[in-house]
Image (cartoon, grey):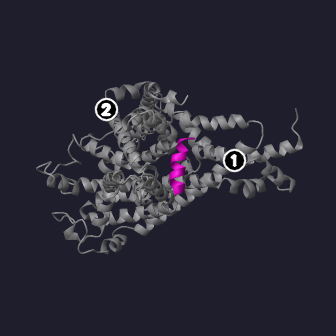
């Protein structure tokens, strides 16, 4: 069927509009997706001539202690997810009250979300100083005797970074949960109260189940964020994940391999593992929460 | 605020029993005091690190490590904010950040709207294929995206250039998706009446359709403004010269070399976040609705 003159004109117009965007998408989105996979099976780097090396990069990762440390740290990092959910739900419940100035507090909680992670990490590094304010508070409260080195203690450094990640995300997740709380029709809660349900019963049997889709969404977002964590570690502990790889996560390690050692093939291989890890966690999360509450909405 | 005060007055009128009302209102006052205490604690936690940084930035050298720490600096000095411009090329960094953010947001606005529009409003062969190809990139894993983009930037001779920083994120699939959804919801009548008036395709797009999707455009601008202004690692990778750095990479680089003189870093960091905070305070509704709404699509 031949196109009418009008249709031909419209098609020309459409493609003229699409062309610049499509070219950029092909160069910077499609090619990386397609080319990134085979790259993981080559030795592409700043020094060698590029050739196909099969599974050698993965074998190398398998015998690379830093890779295992980074993998362990990345998986450990997922413990920020439940903490974020718990605290941000609490904050959402707090700001869901009809109080004077409540909008001021909502705004205040959201400020860390919009500021740069660089600024946040610099501020937190200063809080964590050995003669810094956190140690002062802890000493005054009598919790510790001498200063703790949150930055250079191998066992604490990663948890310090987690604090920053949690702190930076709270306001954002709080807002999603607030939207969730406000989407629950108040008639449901009223009806339960009339039926004689106490406050906790209402929360347990009505609010929490109806909030589950939001918990699911926020958990998913924060799992992906946790496994990809980069900026806060880079600013606070550098590309090597100091001290002694204690804060080295897979994203940071991928960066170090690729852009410090210029070992692109190996970097792509480690990057692939990160992607697989995110996929595994996503699937687990979907499976796990499906039982919880998704079906309430279906 | 308004509906709030009326609901309270209605409630107090309803509860007529005197003593009942008294204990109840006392309980209510206690409950709201407790709520405010919790709200303030959470606010101190959320703003504390920045407030402490702000306090440090206003301190004179000998008070920075004072023990016990000074919460409110005494004496207050603006010297750090003035000297920091001599210590580091801060104006240059600010210029670089504004340039990068402006270019990034501008290109996104142009490219994403002209890509989304035909996918939403024009019937043409290949439309569905193109749309699904674009959307598929949202779910396909992009494991080595940064590495391949770096290789491409080098091959295009864009290493150590601003264009090399901005081009890979000059168009975003997420934005295209968001804008396409917005274009689709515009009723057909608008387009028809414009066509009857003799408007050509580009005019319909630019003068009729684009103004109709202002909320979606605002969301795109806010997202990209934040992403570019706060971006850290990609500029670090692409730029070889430190004086081409925008604020975030520059501060992360300098905090290592200037660690002995932290108040300067504190002042520089405060300066770097102020524009973002001001814009957020002015447009907070758009920010929050945009960021929360976007995940619910």
Task: Look at mark 2 in the image and give the residue it sits on.
Answer: A72
Who is closer to the viewer here, B211 or A233? B211
Residue B131 location, x and y as percent? 67, 38
Q: Secondary structure at mark 1?
A: helix
- Is residue A129 part of the magenta span, yes or no? no
Q: CA distance from mark 2 to mark 1?
A: 45 Å
Local packing at callout 2 (Cα closer than 10 Å; few below 14, some 14-19, many 20+) is: some
Residue drawn at (35%, 74%) of the image? B82
Q: Secondary structure at mark 2?
A: helix
**Number of labelled discs?**
2
- Tell me: A204 left or right of A296: left
Q: Is residue A72 visible?
A: yes
**Chain letter belonging to callout 2:** A
Q: Is residue A122 visible?
A: no
- Tell me: A39 left or right of B134: left
Residue drawn at (33%, 53%) of the image? B19
Which quadrant would residue B140 be assigned to in this image? Answer: top right
Q: Which residues are magenta?
A: B285-297
Residue A195 location, x and y as percent? 45, 33
Residue A181 location, x and y as percent? 47, 42
- Decide whether the magenta segment is chiefly helix, strand or loop: helix
Q: Are marks 2 and 1 in contact (CB under 8 Å)?
A: no
Vertical comparison of A269 with A182: above or below: above
Residue B80 location, x and y as percent? 31, 71
Mark number displayed over residue B292: none
Residue drawn at (19%, 55%) of the image? A137
Residue drawn at (47%, 39%) of the image? A190
Picture quarter with the C terminus of chain A: top right
Who is closer to the viewer here, B41 or B262? B41
Vertical comparison of B296 with B58: above or below: above
Mark number displayed over residue B183: 1
């Amino acid at each position: 069927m031949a196109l009418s003159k009008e249709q031909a004109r419209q098609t020309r117009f459409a493609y003229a509009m699409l062309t610049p965007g499509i070219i950029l998408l092909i160069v910077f989105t499609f090619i990386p997706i397609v080319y990134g996979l085979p790259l993981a099976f080559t030795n592409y780097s700043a020094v060698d001539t590029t050739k196909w090396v099969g599974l050698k990069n993965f074998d190398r990762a398998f015998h690379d202690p830093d890779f295992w440390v980074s993998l362990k740290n990345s998986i450990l990092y997922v413990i920020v997810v439940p903490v974020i959910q718990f605290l941000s739900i609490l904050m959402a419940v707090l700001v869901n009250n009809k109080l004077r100035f409540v909008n001021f507090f909502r705004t205040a909680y959201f400020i860390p979300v919009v500021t740069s992670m660089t600024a946040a990490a610099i501020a937190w590094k200063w809080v964590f100083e050995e003669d810094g304010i956190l140690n002062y508070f802890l000493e005054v409260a009598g919790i510790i005797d001498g200063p703790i080195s949150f930055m250079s203690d191998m066992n604490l450094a990663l948890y310090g970074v987690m604090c920053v990640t949690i702190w930076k995300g709270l306001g954002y997740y709080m807002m999603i949960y607030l939207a969730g709380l406000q989407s629950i029709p108040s008639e449901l809660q009223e009806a339960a109260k009339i039926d004689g349900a106490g406050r906790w019963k209402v929360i347990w049997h009505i609010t929490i189940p109806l909030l589950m889709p939001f918990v699911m969404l926020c958990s998913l977002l924060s799992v992906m964020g946790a496994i990809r964590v980069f900026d806060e570690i880079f600013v606070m502990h550098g590309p090597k994940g100091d001290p002694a790889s204690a804060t080295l996560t897979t994203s940071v390690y991928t960066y170090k391999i690729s852009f410090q050692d210029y070992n692109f093939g190996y970097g792509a291989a480690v990057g692939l593992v990160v992607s697989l890890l995110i996929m595994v966690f996503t699937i687990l999360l979907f499976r796990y929460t499906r039982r919880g509450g998704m079906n309430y909405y279906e | 605020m308004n509906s709030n005060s009326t609901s309270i007055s209605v409630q107090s009128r309803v509860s007529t029993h005197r003593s009942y009302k008294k204990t109840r209102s006392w309980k209510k006052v206690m409950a709201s005091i407790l709520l405010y205490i919790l709200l303030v604690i959470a606010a101190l936690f959320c703003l504390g690190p920045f407030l402490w940084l702000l306090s440090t930035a206003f301190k004179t050298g000998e008070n920075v490590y004072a023990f016990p720490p000074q919460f409110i600096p005494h004496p207050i000095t603006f010297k750090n904010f003035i000297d920091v411009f001599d210590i580091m090329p801060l104006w240059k960094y600010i210029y670089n950040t504004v340039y990068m953010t402006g270019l990034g947001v501008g290109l996104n606005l142009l490219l994403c709207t002209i890509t989304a529009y035909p996918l939403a409003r024009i019937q043409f062969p290949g439309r569905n294929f193109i749309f699904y190809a674009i959307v598929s990139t949202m779910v396909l894993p992009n494991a080595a995206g940064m590495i391949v983009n770096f290789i491409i930037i080098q091959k295009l001779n864009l290493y150590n250039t601003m264009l090399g920083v901005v081009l890979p994120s000059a168009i975003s699939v997420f934005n295209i998706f968001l804008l396409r959804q917005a274009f689709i919801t515009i009723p057909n009548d608008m387009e028809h009446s414009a066509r009857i008036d003799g408007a050509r395709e580009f005019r319909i797009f630019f003068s009729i359709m684009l103004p109709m999707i202002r909320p979606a455009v605002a969301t795109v601008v806010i997202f990209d403004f934040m992403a570019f202004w706060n971006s850290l690692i990609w500029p670090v990778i692409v730029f070889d010269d430190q004086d081409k750095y925008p604020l975030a990479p520059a501060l992360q680089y300098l905090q290592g070399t200037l660690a002995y003189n932290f108040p300067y870093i504190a002042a520089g960091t405060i300066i770097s976040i102020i524009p973002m905070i001001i814009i957020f305070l002015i447009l907070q509704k758009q920010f929050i609705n945009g960021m929360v709404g976007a995940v619910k699509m």
